[in-house]
Image (tube, rainbow, N blue to C red):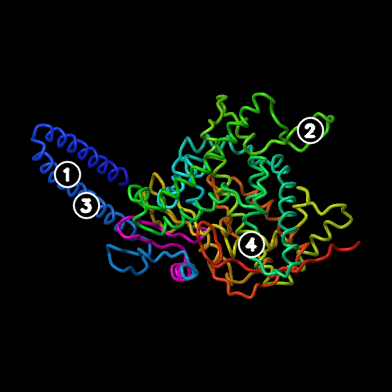
Amino acid sequence: MTEVIESRMAVIDAVLDRLLDGLLGLGRLLSPLCSLFVLLQLSALVVLLLLSLRVVCLLWSHAQFTRRLRCFSKPPTQNWLMGHLGEMRSTEEGLQVVDQLVRTYSHSCSWFLGPFYSLVRLFHPDYIKPLLLAPASITVKDELFYGFLRPWLGQSLLLSNGEDWSRRRRLLTPAFHFDILKNYVKIFNHSSDIMHSKWRRLVAEGESRQDMFNHISLMTLDSLLRCTFSYNSNCQESSSEYIAAIFELSTLVIERRGRILHHWDCLYWRSPEGQRFKQACSVVHGFTRTVVQERRAQLLHRGEPESHTDTTGGEEKKKKRVADFIDLLLLSKDEDGHGLTDEEIKAEADTFMFGGHDTTASGISWVLYNLSQHQDHQDRCRAEVNDLLQDRKTEDLDWEDLSSLPFTTMCIKESLRLHSPVSAVTRRYTKDMTVPGGRVIPQGSICLVSIYGTHHNPEIWPDPDVYNPMRFDPENSKDRSSHAFIPFSSGPRNCIGQKFAMAELRVVVALTLRRFRLTPGGVEVRRLPQLVLRAEGGLWLTLETLDAPQD
């Protein structure tokens, strides 16, 4: 059905091109004054004809999807044409609507954004599992939710499909091997130290109440710049054009998604917001492109940097720079011996920066918020960290330490369930997909896999709004569905950086609890689901500096 619609639209565009060519030819034959008048009239007719044909195709498509999606429950709509347009809100109230949908429909429902987009919303493990585990060859990232990122992130792993995606995934997977991630733990320690030094200074100055998102976003950006580019930006203490551009792009993507007229490129790129987006993209792309080109030249002259943590073998080996993300991409080769081009590396580096800083910052911030609400859990985590670091000369955590924080990890996972950084992921499929109950999702429909809805489904999680880390005790988890907890999605297109994110979460949360006590900031917290889950007006907590435990 999708191919039929697209082919008809292509025919319409081809007819338009031919008509315009004919009009230009006619204009050359007529007198200048008459030509202008006739050309304007004919142009208006052509535009009206084209719009009419597009509207007909749109309404026909809408009618077909409406008919085929009758096997799914359909929440009440304004009318047949407008559907649920305007009802999907990125606010606290919008999340409460999702809660009501989950309680009412239990596993799934259809959803129509006017005649423009037909969706199936899914929020039960049994329904999302066959979709997320579907082969990557039939899975497509839809343009509604991901297309706005393409001018920024290019044809990267996040946005590519088919064989192009498979090749990129194979080339990028070694960059997230355990031996590589071990090197990054030192960076997480260092970036945390900088943030905590700033917090101590602020507390000493009487400013103990702080917005977690503000500080932690800068800290995760600092870590990512070091892990990706070996670049010391000093962004936690001073601003930079590159950092400002990343924040600007994230804000503009959110704004565009909420304005239906800006979904059309021809309107958006002529708007002030579109011009700002282009300018910010130019800054980010220029920075990344320069680093990639310089690093490729360095590799040609100096050879490969060290890519693992083994420092045996003499001083010469110890002095070698450890490989960062850019190095690993430059050195990667596929089975035919071909590597990534500079443009491909730039796209992956930009995607790593986009996907790695906001999501992790959201995760860390909400963990600290939840522990500030539950001092008993906070105290138990702190005791676990202090026991681990007892008799150590430094407070730095090693890779091997991360597996020795079981209760802290349970608290992190419960926070990722209750406050998932990403509320949903969307997919389209190149074939009809069957879910339980014999229901069929037609090819071309957008499948909105609600991570938030699944994590708050009372059929799966009793008392879903209660923060209870014991849900993730191994004994309590053994009979749970594999797709009941999916903060990093699942299947072949899951988050490639999830081990990176979990390592940073554990390091930052552990060191923060060792050094500070966190209590509520005295402000009502209203959730704000944007690209990641934030809080309206910031997530404010009160910090109390703790002395290092004495042996």
| Residue hosting label 2 | 319
Is residue 140 visible from the viewing direction of this image?
A: yes
Q: Quadrant of residue 421?
A: bottom right
Horizontal and vertical percent position of residue 160: 47, 41
- The kind of residue tagged 3 is Val
Horizontal and vertical percent position of residue 522: 64, 75
Mark 2 or mark 3, earlier in chain: 3
Q: Which mark is residue 365?
A: 4
Binning the other alpha carbons within 10 Å of mark 2 as few (below 14), some (14 to 19) or many (20 upward) gives: few
Q: Which mark is residue 43?
A: 1
C-alpha separation, residue under disc 1 versus residue under disc 4:
56 Å
Horizontal side of residue 383 vs 187, given as left or right: right
Q: Quadrant of residue 350?
A: top right
Kind of element beneath mark 3: helix
* Residue toward you, 52 or 205: 205
Mark 1 or mark 2, earlier in chain: 1
Binning the other alpha carbons within 10 Å of mark 4 as few (below 14), some (14 to 19) or many (20 upward) gives: many
Q: Nearer the viewer, mark 3 or mark 4?
A: 4
Q: Which mark is residue 56?
A: 3
Horizontal and vertical percent position of residue 493: 53, 46
Question: What's the magenta region?
Answer: 97-126
Binning the other alpha carbons within 10 Å of mark 1 as few (below 14), some (14 to 19) or many (20 upward) gives: some
Mark 3 or mark 4, earlier in chain: 3
Binning the other alpha carbons within 10 Å of mark 3 as few (below 14), some (14 to 19) or many (20 upward) gives: few
C-alpha separation, residue under disc 4 versus residue under disc 2:
36 Å
Mark 3 or mark 1, earlier in chain: 1
* Residue toward you, 170 or 114: 114
Horizontal side of residue 257 vs 14, given as left or right: right
